[in-house]
Amino acid sequence: MLLHLLAAASDHIQFKDLGLSPVAVNLGFFQIKWYSLAYIAGILIGWWYLLKLLAQPGAPMARRHADDLVFYATLGIILGGRLGYVLFYAPNMIVEAPSQIIRLWDGGMSFHGGVIGTTVAILLLARRQGLSWLRIHDYVACVAPFGLFFGRLANFVNGELWGKPADLPWSVVFRNTVETGLPEPARHPSQLYEAGLEGVLLFVVLWFFFWRTDSRYQPGKLVGIFVLGYGLCRFFVEFFREPDAQLVWLVDATGLHMGQWLCIPMIVGGIYLIATAKGRRQRVEPIAGSESVA
């Protein structure tokens, strides 16, 4: 099977022929990478969409709170994402190379860590402003797919986090996926699978429940839909992804990737939040405007 995949690799999409580079702008003395632009685009477009959501009746916070939230959430995403990566995927870094922890420009971010960091950020903002943290989280969950979409596209542009060998018309021959000197097999472009599922599909699902149902008046339902949806999508795509080299032992021992193990509590928590959301429904007094929603 492997020999067949290697022989067929020349018939598939060659990553090198796509003309992609991790660097978006290169001024010689200064570089701007697509990964950085992905974070910026996700935050800015998410902020714009959040304001659209807050303009609807029953919003849990005002514009001034949203502006503060962007600052809090950005810190939560960056700090939580990086610390999550270190703890979940590279714990040896803490002892062997602690100075590498702060080198964000070298890559290495965990979405699950980012979720934890963002949750803490929302809790701090809500406590400081006297707001409902769970309802704020519902609205933030609706904008999160933007960041996921752009982030996964950046992963593809960087030629990282590729999938397992595959003989499919859309398989891609990435660079440096095996030891030097060995032929590169064609692989699943799992980054694009995730962009489609975690970004596009999850956004559409959340859009429907926010705009076409009364889910936003049931605290925890939208964030429950998000964490359940993300957990299922990520769990599924991990079957097509190559496991992290340092965590192959976990796959050999359990049959599941680290990403899948981290998704299990998300799936369970999402089901719980959705199932109990109706019981938390109450008259919603909006922060901005005068309309109450029963």
Image (cartoon, helix red, strand yellow):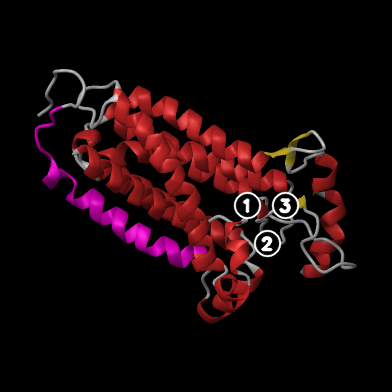
Segment colored magenta:
259-285
Q: CA distance from mark 3 to mark 2?
A: 11 Å
Q: Is residue 14 visible?
A: no
Residue 258 location, x and y as percent? 51, 68
Residues under numbered marks 2 and 1 in contact, where contact means CB atoms less than 8 Å apart: yes
Residue 71, magenta (yes or no): no
What is the magenta segment's predominant secondary structure? helix
Viewer-proximal residue, 245 or 128? 128
What residue sits right under mark 2 in the picture? 164
* Residue 229 in sight in this render: yes
Which amino acid, mark 1? Ser
Amino acid found under the numbered disc labelled 3? Leu
Q: Residue furthest right?
A: 181
The residue carrying mark 3 is 168
Helix, strand or loop under label 1: helix
Disc with the residue nearer the chain's start (1 vs 3): 3
Report the residue at 62% width, 66% height from top. 244
